[in-house]
Image (spheres, helix red, strand yellow):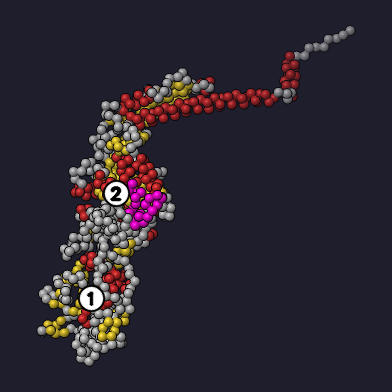
Amino acid sequence: MLIKPDARPVFAHLARKVLQFRSDEGGAIAIFVLMVFVLMVCFGGIAVDVMRFETRRVALQETLDRAVLSASNVVLPVSQTPQSVGMEWFQKAGLGDYITYDYATPAITGEATTTSRTARMTSSVRSYNWFTHMLGVPYFEAPSIVSAAQQGEAKLEVFLVLDITGSMSASSGSTTKIAALRQAATNFVTILKFNKDSGGNYTIPKDPNNLISIGMVPYSSNVNIPVELRNQFNVSHLSSWNYIANQGVPKINCFEINPDTFNTMALSRTDPIPMAAVANVAKGVPNASITDIGSSSTTATNGGSVNISRTSPVAINTNSGTFMCNHGDNPSTGADESASNLVVMPATDMTALKAQIAQLNPRGNTSIAVGMRWGTALIDGSARPIYANLLAGQPGMAGRPADNADDESVRHSDGSMGTRKIIVVMTDGTHVSSQHIRDDYKSGPSPIWRGDDGNMAILYNDTGIGFNGGLRPGVNPNGTPPPVNSCSGWSLADAVVSGKVVKRNFFVPHLKANSVKRRVGTQAEGAGTGTSVTGGCDPLAWISATGSPATPKWTGSGNVRNLDWSEVWRYATVDWVIEQLYMRSNVTGATNYNTIYNAMVGSYLTSTSNMDSLLNTNCTAAKAAGVEVFGIILGDDVTEGPIQNCASPGTGYYYKVTNADNLNAAFEEIAKILSPLRLTE
């Protein structure tokens, strides 16, 4: 007999199944993969929806940018409002309306005048999501996309600070540097003032309202300014000319600006600024063999001797490139080009500027710092009284230069924009310090006299200071006759003639013989028959003053005039004055060439490093005042640092051109950068 077992409870059966499932490892990874797959689909869907949204947002932003740029172009007539132009551009952009995204109709504002246009557009885009709507995010939206633009026809004030040093005459590439500069600067001016026609030529005026002014500072060792500009300042040490005081040297006017002012742009019109003397300071090789006077000298019987060839004064040639201050006349041509290298005051009409650019002539050493100093001084707002005095009535020049704070983004009451100030500084070399006449020898009465025959005399004091108070031959220093010193045997001590004391204090070098025979016995002065001494003291070269007023006279002298120091340098070189008037006299204290030269001549802006520092200081002041500085160097051997540091920071402000063929491209690129049409938001 079979016995049926009792049925297991349901709970026990379920428990057994659970235990079996827990211990079964088959198919466990499938669940994990399924979970990861779901997450990947979710994140991938989010990425797709975000990418679709960004594509639409960027498309809208770019469309708005193009629309406002077109709407802000001042070439358009005022009747074509920024609103109509912007909306038409937007409608023709082809964005369209689709189910998966929406573009809102832009809100457009703007205004147009004859001198400026602005436009501002605001819109939005909504992109409906393909995936993330399942997560409760039906769409992504950029609720406010903004774009704005303005065409400055803001006032533009530009100064070209251009290198015209002697090295600019050198060949570079297929041309000369100066020829390339003339072309590049001319093209720069043209591009700023004209748009291209259908043939690609710059013939269409784009500045009908005379908002763009351009000036030029050509520089070499110094900067030559027009006399009218010189008269706007308080100057000192102004030259005499033709015995008329304070006339200046015709067509040559250079300042020696105080280095302490390079930390600012403004140049005071009240503080005295010393003029640079126009002088040939070239240092010669001393052509002298000297034996000083003294009781122990037997060569010329205590008169000493000096052997220097007898020559006539060497008049200065003011068009020589050796001067720190000179004009640009080319002596090899018959034309008067003395005004070629003058500063050109800004104007809105480019006729005069282009003519001046076309005749730039290379001269002198390199002083970028001085060129830049003039550029900053004339673009600074403080120069407005100068403009008012010199440029009154010229189109578009009223109220210039603008205040430095007159930013280009500022809109004036007449609808015009603010002012953009630009300096373009170009060089082909590094700084070279130039020699100049020291202040004490620039102007004022000199001890030198000149006769109508062109010969000169120099006055020596009985006692005094400097080079004119030394012990003269024949003077008794102890006041007890006979004279301790004599001149080839004859005394040059004071004599009484007709009851008056006659002082032979004037030395006239052309009267001095190269070889003098010494006195024998009681022979008459100058008629000695003794030993011939080359360069010996010649009493006939020492004369006394006659007449009233007392002046030195010699045969053929005619009218003899006392020269201002500036006139001395007009008629003679520094080298000639030292050798013939000082050393040849053999007066004690006046026989050392270097001592006299160093007293008269020194360095203006003392060294290359000093000039580099001053340039950097002045450029920093300009940039701090809002001036944009573009720098160009020409040549592959030019030290880049000074100009690179001077240029404004950022792309497009510094250019290195290896040869003159590429100079035009640099100037052209800068001119295009200065286009005033730009996005502002």
* Identity of the residue drawn at 24% across and 54% down: 335
- Looking at the rendering, in which quadrant would you find the N terminus? top right
Indicate the position of residue 377 as horizontal and vertical percent values: 28, 51
Q: Amino acid at mark 1?
A: His
Identified at 32% across, 64% down, the residue is 435
Residue 170 within the magenta-colored segment of the rendering: yes
Task: Give above or below for 47 relative to 490.
Answer: above
Q: Which mark is residue 71?
A: none
Crowd tier of the residue under label 2, counting other residues whose Cα lies within 10 Å: few below 14, some 14–19, many 20 or above: some
Residue 441 falls in which quadrant of the image?
A: bottom left
Res 492 quadrant in image = bottom left
Say which residue appears at 34% left-offset and 46% top-offset.
184
- Give 42 or 332, whichever is nearer the viewer: 332
Front residue (pair 577, 622): 577
Q: Point out the residue furthest to the right here.
A: 1
> Element type at marker 1?
helix
Residue under label 2, please give it. 358
Question: How many numbered marks, from 0 up?
Answer: 2
Query: From which residue to which does the magenta span run?
Result: 163-183
Labelled disc at residue 510: 1
Mark 2: which amino acid? Ala
Q: Position of residue 191 (x, y in %)?
A: 32, 40
C-alpha gap between disc 1 and disc 2: 46 Å
Q: Nearer the viewer, residue 215 or 357?
A: 357
